[in-house]
Image (spheres, helix red, strand yellow):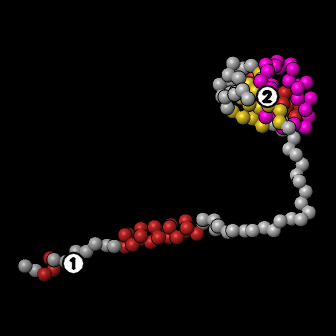
Amino acid sequence: MNDDMFEDIGIDLTPLIDVVFMLLVFFIMTTTFSRPVLDIILPQSETAEKSVERPRELHIGIKADGSLFYNDKAVTKEELPAILDSMPGALLNLHVDEKAPFEAFVGLVDIAKEKRGGHFVISTQTHRTR
C-alpha cells in the first residue's frame, strides 16, 4: 500500500475556539454592566423642614355594571362636575373595574379632562368598598 493514501485526518478546532471565545466575551461584558452597590451615608440636614402634606385624594369609581361611585355612594354623571369642583386641589384617582363598559370610562375621563386639565390617576382594579 501506498503511504499517500493515508493522510492525516484531523478535526478543525477553529470554530470551537471561536464559539468559546464569543461565550467568554459575552460573560465578561454582561458582568461589567451590573450596577455597583455603594453604601452612601448622607449627613442629616439641620435646617430641613417638614414637607407639605400631600393633598387629599378624590376617589371616583366605576363598577362592572357602569355605575359611578364617590365615597362608596352611587352618583350620576351629572353630579361629577360639582364633586370635582368641591375639591380642586385634591388628586383625582379613578378606580375603574376591569369589566366596566368602555362608554362609562370614556365619559368619566372626558369630565376629568375638562375639570382637571388631564391631571388624574387611573386604577384598573375591581371596585372594593373601603
Residue under pointer 1: 8
Alpha carbon separation for disc pair 1 and 2 = 83 Å
Q: Compared with residue 60, is residue 51 higher up or lower down, i.e. above or below?
A: below
Residue beneath the point at 50% across and 70% down? 25
Residue under pointer 2: 60
Which stretch is magenta?
70-93
Q: Which mark is residue 81?
A: none
Q: Mark 1 is on which residue type?
A: Asp
**Which of 15/4 is in front?**
15
Residue beneath the point at 72% across and 68% down? 40
SS at mark 2 in the image: strand
Q: Quadrant of residue 32 in the image? A: bottom right
Residue 60 located within the stretch drawn in magenta: no
| Label tally | 2
Residue 102 in sight in this render: no
Q: In terms of sequence position, does the residue under pointer 1 or pointer 2 come before the other?
A: 1
Q: Quadrant of the C terminus?
A: top right
Residue beneath the point at 55% across and 67% down? 31
Q: Position of residue 79 (x, y in %)?
A: 87, 20
Q: Mark 2 is on which residue type?
A: Ile
**Which of 8/40 is in front?**
40
The label nearer to you, 1 versus 2, is 2
Say whether residue 2 is left or right of residue 17.
left
Q: Position of residue 65 (x, y in %)?
A: 69, 18
